[in-house]
Image (tube, rainbow, N blue to C red):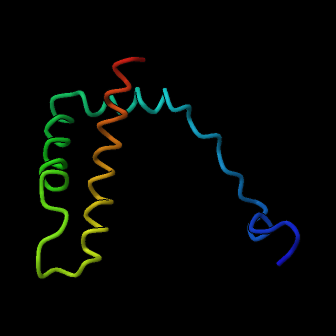
Amino acid sequence: MSEDGWDSLNPAFEEPDPPKASDLDILYGRVFKSEEGQQVLAHLRAITIELPTWNPGEDSSFGYVRTGMAEIVRLIEKRVNRSNNG
């Protein structure tokens, strides 16, 4: 591999500047504070956080997947809550 590391594999690619966290929080708030967004968030919570992470008889790796799914919903909820302060 060259001295440039991974960047040399696709030199034409330039990653755009990511939005500031507060800007993203505001966007999450706009989407998920609406009536429809609250319904979607409630559904996501019901099929992730409110279900068991793992059930007896399932492969143990299933718990890792379920935990990751629930973490996405927690991330959304956290951003929506932070949007209240911005």
Left or right of 85? Residue 48 is: left
Q: Residue at x 28, y 47 (%)?
A: 73
Q: Position of residue 57 (x, y in %)?
A: 12, 82
Q: Position of residue 25 (x, y in %)?
A: 42, 30
Residue 4 placement: quadrant: bottom right
Q: Position of residue 46 (x, y in %)?
A: 12, 50
Q: Position of residue 24 (x, y in %)?
A: 46, 33
- Nearest the viewer among 39 and 80 is 80
- Nearest the viewer among 66 and 5 is 66
**Screen quadrant of the C terminus:** top left
Vertical order, 55 against 53 (above or below): below
Vertical order, 30 against 42 (above or below): above
Residue 53 placement: quadrant: bottom left
Vertical order, 43 against 8 (above or below): above
Left or right of 63? Residue 15 is: right
**Screen quadrant of the N terminus:** bottom right
Residue 47 placement: quadrant: bottom left
Q: Residue at x 21, y 28 (%)?
A: 34
Q: Residue at x 12, y 57 (%)?
A: 51
Left or right of 7? Residue 51 is: left
